[in-house]
Image (cartoon, grey):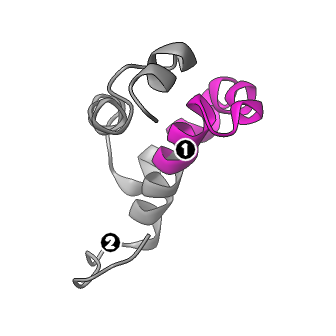
């Protein structure tokens, strides 16, 4: 990954949400061993979202943008991921 422009001026808590999104995306196909950890950590997710002042609905929208076919690995592998 490279950055050609300035990174957004997110606060630390907002960057934590971005990192969770990336980990969630990796857990779908590239590192499936992460899947149980991501699906069983609802309270941690809520704590991070609350700290970043992001609603669960907003998080789900961002997740849908990164993982448009959901958690089904056979769909993501068919899409070229």
| Label 1 neighbour load within 10 Å: few <14, some 14-19, many 20+ | few
Q: Residue 25 in the image: state x and y as whole percent.
A: 50, 39
Q: Which residue is mark 2?
A: 10
| In the foreground, 20 or 13 | 20
Range covered by the magenta-colored residues: 21-47
Q: Residue 13 in the image: state x and y as whole percent.
A: 45, 63
Residue at left offset 54%, top offset 38%:
24
Say the numbered circle drawn on residue 47: 1
Q: Residue 48 in the image: state x and y as whole percent.
A: 52, 49
Q: Residue 62 in the image: state x and y as whole percent.
A: 30, 39
Residue at left offset 27%, top offset 78%:
9
Q: Secondary structure at mark 2?
A: loop
Tell me which numbered mark, 2 or 1, is placed earlier along the sequence.
2
Relative to residue 71, is residue 2 drawn left or right?
left
Residue at left offset 51%, top offset 56%:
19
Establish if 74 lies above or below 13: above
Relative to residue 71, is residue 11 drawn left or right?
left
User: Do residues under tags 2 and 1 come within 8 Å of each other at their CB atoms?
Assistant: no
Relative to residue 68, is residue 47 drawn left or right?
right
Say the numbered circle drawn on residue 31: none
């Amino acid at each position: 990954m490279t950055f050609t422009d300035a990174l957004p001026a997110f606060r630390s808590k907002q960057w934590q949400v971005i990192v969770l999104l990336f980990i969630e995306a990796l857990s779908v196909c590239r590192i499936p061993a992460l899947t149980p950890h991501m699906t069983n950590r609802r309270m941690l997710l809520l704590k991070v979202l609350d700290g970043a002042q992001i609603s669960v609905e907003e998080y789900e929208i961002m997740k849908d943008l990164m993982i448009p076919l959901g958690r089904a690995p056979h769909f993501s592998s068919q899409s070229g991921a």
